[in-house]
């Protein structure tokens, strides 16, 4: 079984902001894999769905807390599904990566991402998969000035391509193996 968590902020105010690209990618995976609609899980303070992708059972989670409190929902889901952190995929934005680039990695530090830090604290480990979707590219601009902005029409086209690429990587990681998906996703 795999658990896939899409980080972002809930609510209409944050919809389509750069910080929510991870949440949007997991929503796109749900639609692509034709999984049941997300339902609110009060105990987790998150949206969740589950089903199968190929022969593999998966759980998808969208925390309904602000980004920096995502660990609460992640921990509740890990306990519910009785899954080891190595079976968790955290999908999130990365202001240090240029828009249009992405990385799949395992066991890395948070690099200052507050949502990732929250999950690491909650799980008491960083031994899980991270799909980092680039939203930045300008090293001299602080992340706080990037993450809550909406994509420009030009950037939106790139973001949609990256969401498709992320869905494909998740499908490959689930149906084949994460290392194979990493080799393709990180190109």
Image (tube, rainbow, N blue to C red):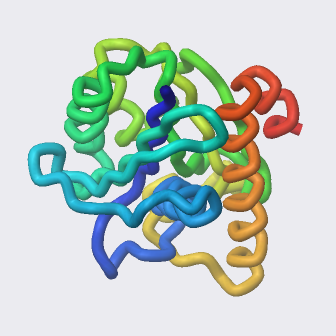
Look at 60% across and 20% down and name the residue there. 106
Res. 19 in view: no
Look at 78% across and 65% down and name the residue there. 161
Res. 171 in view: yes
Look at 66% across and 40% down and name the residue there. 54
Residue 47 lies in quadrant: bottom left
Q: Is residue 31 above or below residue 56?
A: below
Camera-side residue: 47 or 120? 47
- Which of the image's four quarters has the C terminus? top right
Could you say where residue 125 lies in the image, as x and y percent from the top left?
A: 38, 13
Specify the farthest residue to the bottom. 153
**Left of 186 or right of it: where is 96?**
left
Specify the farthest residue to the front. 55
Camera-side residue: 149 or 66? 66
Could you say where residue 5 lies in the image, as x and y percent from the top left?
A: 43, 43
Figure label count? 0
Look at 42% across and 75% down and name the residue there. 15
Q: Is residue 56 above or below residue 49?
A: above
**Left of 77 or right of it: where is 158?**
right
């Amino acid at each position: 079984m795999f658990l896939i968590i899409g980080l972002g902020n809930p609510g209409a105010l944050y919809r389509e902001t750069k910080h929510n690209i991870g949440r949007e990618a997991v929503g796109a995976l749900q639609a692509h894999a034709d999984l049941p609609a997300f339902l609110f899980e009060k105990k987790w303070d998150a949206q969740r769905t589950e089903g199968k992708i190929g022969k593999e059972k998966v759980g998808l989670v969208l925390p309904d807390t602000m980004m920096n409190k995502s660990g609460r929902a992640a921990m509740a889901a890990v306990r519910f599904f009785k899954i080891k952190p190595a079976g968790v995929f955290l999908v999130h934005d990365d202001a240090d990566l240029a828009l249009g680039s992405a990385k799949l990695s395992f066991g890395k530090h948070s690099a200052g991402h507050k949502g990732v830090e929250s999950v690491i604290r909650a799980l008491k480990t960083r031994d899980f998969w991270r799909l980092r979707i680039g939203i930045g590219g300008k090293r001299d601009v602080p992340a706080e000035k990037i993450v809550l902005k909406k994509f420009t029409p030009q950037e939106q086209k790139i973001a949609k391509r990256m969401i498709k690429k992320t869905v494909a990587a998740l499908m490959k990681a689930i149906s084949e193996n994460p290392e194979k998906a990493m080799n393709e996703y990180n190109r």
